[in-house]
Image (cartoon, grey):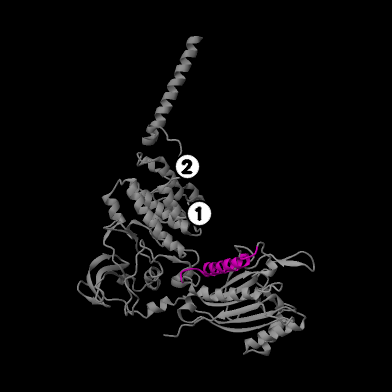
């Protein structure tokens, strides 16, 4: 097998103090990650520029770059670059702002812990830019030097200006973010404002031509050029060239899959990869699930293997390992856990905890008209499990009765994680993922935005949860099969919700209002989070309480209106009769 092409760059850096001869208030750094971090987090390059009027801004710039390069690589592998980077920068900004507030009745931003910040992260086949202030990131073209960032400097006059945005000024900070496709051979330049004097494409090309094998020397040449053009500020230059990009999956999990053999058919009492098979739990055209015992720990586990029918489906097999990958990055009592620690294996399979109990599908069969309290307890636990996915920038995407287990103690567990959409993997195209999730679950529980081509979000999982809630209460689907026929915005507007009170008139009216909101065809009109839906189900606000209609209207709306029409007709006839008698 040919060796997989990896992400490779050439990097050069140079920084010097300005003509003032004092402390260099710029700071820069880079992490050329290796191993799994190269795939999950990529390569990061960053610089910061302290403000010259402050005696402590060099502390701010050093803290900004160091904390970013350290903490970014400690964030969840499931998070997108944007979320990871902005979370780290928000924490850094909060720390700098706190230093400015400490011991000062009134903060003077011109003398505090304040700095600009720019970072470039190369992950998979994408380039991510983070920026605040007036340091800059450029891309070099043949005849032009394209500035990719916007200067956050406010000019009051030709001689007077100030930074409109920077780290440390306020308790919160807005960080500019861009995601661009990466290209082999592309050259990028990061520079503080002191390095930008007289900078153009010809100067950069000349510096690179003079030192083609030494980017540090090229960066120094650009600093010399800025100094010669009269810059008296601190100068920092970073040059980065993209030498090679990975072919696809930055996590390289498809390579792990390719190195594994397809498992043989398993049978009771069979020894397999350190487990003893007990019995078959489930078999379908896509996979087989077995109850087994870990020979080392004695723990009961569920082993899942791909079906022989799927053995030629590379995309399915590539995603097969995703279930365990996701499970190892979540820690919630309502989400299926992996079985034990990771260990070497020869065959393609996943080992997960065994949940002894019944599926939600079976529970609904056993409880065709459950009380509201029982449904609330199940929904609250499902919401907690989904919130764990959403906190890691994941969507479950296949919430249905068969993928929910209820154990003998009443604990609810979400299972079957292989359809999950993971933002951190979608950035690099792992498992064939794209930024826009595709339909992965059972159609009747899937949110309408998937069918209409709209963006999926946490509210898409919320819709599935609301469908389950409705179905638990009455045994029906709120839109029947209408949702599966949606193809555009016009189809969304034609969806007609079947009120729960038509099927369970004894349930409170506010319950219909809560469900109807969670089941809105337009995602923006639903509750914002699964936790809000669960809260509304347990403690509905005044917006869900309306005047209760007459009892007959709730039990039989058609008969109610027929009676009303009859009474109105009789009244009209009586009035006409009186008028005739009067004449």
Q: In terms of image quadrants, where is residue 554? A: top left
Q: Is residue 450 left or right of residue 155?
A: left
Residue furthest out toward the left: 269
Q: CA distance from mark 2 to mark 1?
A: 33 Å
Q: Is 93 in the magenta?
A: yes
| Dot placed on the residue nearer the N-terminal end, 2 or 1 | 1
Residue 271 shows up from this direction: yes
Whole-percent x and y of residue 390?
45, 62
Whole-percent x and y of residue 473?
34, 47
Q: Is residue 457 above or below residue 242?
A: above
Q: Do tag 2 and tag 1 residues touch (Cβ < 8 Å)? A: no
Q: In terms of image quadrants, where is residue 148? A: bottom right
Question: Which structural element holds mark 2?
Answer: helix
Whole-percent x and y of residue 512?
41, 44
What's the magenta region? Answer: 77-104
Residue drawn at 28 percent across, 57 percent down: 409
Q: Which residue was labeled with disc 1?
A: 488
Q: Is residue 81 left or right of residue 564?
A: right
Q: Is residue 359 above or below residue 252?
A: above
Q: Which mark is residue 542?
A: 2
Q: Is residue 387 above or below residue 560?
A: below
From the viewer's side, name the closer residue of 19 and 123.
Answer: 19
Q: Which mark is residue 530?
A: none
Residue 498 shows up from this direction: no
Q: Is 520 in the magenta?
A: no
Question: Which structural element holds mark 1?
Answer: loop
Q: Is residue 283 above or below residue 58?
A: above
Could you classify mark 2 by the number of other residues whose Cα lies within 10 Å: few (under 14), some (14-19), or many (20 or more)? few
Pick the quarter of the image with the N terminus: bottom left
Whole-percent x and y of residue 219?
66, 84
Residue drawn at 45 percent across, 50 percent down: 518
From the viewer's side, name the closer residue of 120 and 246.
Answer: 120
């Amino acid at each position: 097998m040919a060796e997989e092409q990896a992400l490779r760059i050439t990097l050069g850096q140079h920084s010097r103090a300005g003509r003032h001869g004092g402390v260099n208030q710029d700071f820069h750094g880079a992490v050329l990650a290796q191993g799994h971090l190269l795939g999950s987090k990529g390569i990061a390059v960053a610089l910061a520029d302290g403000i010259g009027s402050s005696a402590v801004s060099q502390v701010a710039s050093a803290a900004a770059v160091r904390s970013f390069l350290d903490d970014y690589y400690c964030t969840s592998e499931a998070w997108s670059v944007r979320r990871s980077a902005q979370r780290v920068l928000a924490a850094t900004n909060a720390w700098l702002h706190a230093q400015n507030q400490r011991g000062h009745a009134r903060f003077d931003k011109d003398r505090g812990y304040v700095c600009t910040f720019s970072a470039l992260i190369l992950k998979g086949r994408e380039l991510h830019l983070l920026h605040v202030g007036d340091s800059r990131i450029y891309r070099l073209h043949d005849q032009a030097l394209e500035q990719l960032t916007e200067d956050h400097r406010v000019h009051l006059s030709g001689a007077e200006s100030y930074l409109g945005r920077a780290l440390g000024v306020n308790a919160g900070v807005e960080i500019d973010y861009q995601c661009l496709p990466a290209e082999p051979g592309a050259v990028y330049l990061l520079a503080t404002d002191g390095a930008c004097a007289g900078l153009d494409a010809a100067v950069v090309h000349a510096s690179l031509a003079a030192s083609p094998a030494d980017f540090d020397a090229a960066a120094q040449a650009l600093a010399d050029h800025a100094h010669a053009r009269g810059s008296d500020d601190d100068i920092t230059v970073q040059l980065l060239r993209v030498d090679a990009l990975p072919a696809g999956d930055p996590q390289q999990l498809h390579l792990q899959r390719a190195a594994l053999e397809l498992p043989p058919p398993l049978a009771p009492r069979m020894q397999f990869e350190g487990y003893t098979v007990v019995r078959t739990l489930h078999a379908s055209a896509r996979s087989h699930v077995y109850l087994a015992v870990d020979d080392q720990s004695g723990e009961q586990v569920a082993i899942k293997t791909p079906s022989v029918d799927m053995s030629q489906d590379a995309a399915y097999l590539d995603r097969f390992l995703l279930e365990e990958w996701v499970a190892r990055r979540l820690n919630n009592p309502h989400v299926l856990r992996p079985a034990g620690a990771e260990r070497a294996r020869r065959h393609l399979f996943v080992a997960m905890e065994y949940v002894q109990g019944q599926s939600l599908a079976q529970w609904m069969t056993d409880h065709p008209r459950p009380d509201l309290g029982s449904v609330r307890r199940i929904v609250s636990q499902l919401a907690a499990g989904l919130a764990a996915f959403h906190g890691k920038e994941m969507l479950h995407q296949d919430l249905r009765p068969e993928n929910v287990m209820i154990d003998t103690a009443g604990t609810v567990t979400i299972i079957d994680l292989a359809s999950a959409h993971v933002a951190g993997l979608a950035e690099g195209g792992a498992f064939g993922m794209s930024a826009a999730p595709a339909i992965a679950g059972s159609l009747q529980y899937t949110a309408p935005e998937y069918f209409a081509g709209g963006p999926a979000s946490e509210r898409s999982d919320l819709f599935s949860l609301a469908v389950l809630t409705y179905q638990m209460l009455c045994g029906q689907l709120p839109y029947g099969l209408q949702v599966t026929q949606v193809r555009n915005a016009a189809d969304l507007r034609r969806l007609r919700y079947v009120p729960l009170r038509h099927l369970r008139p004894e349930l409170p009216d506010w319950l219909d209002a809560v469900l109807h909101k969670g089941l809105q065809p337009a995602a923006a009109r639903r509750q914002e989070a699964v936790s809000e839906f669960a809260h509304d189900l347990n403690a509905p606000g005044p917006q869900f309480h309306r005047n209760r209609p007459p009892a007959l209207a709730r039990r039989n709306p058609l008969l109610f209106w027929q009676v009303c029409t009859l009474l109105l007709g009789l009244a009209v006839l009586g009035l006409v009769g009186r008028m005739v008698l009067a004449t």
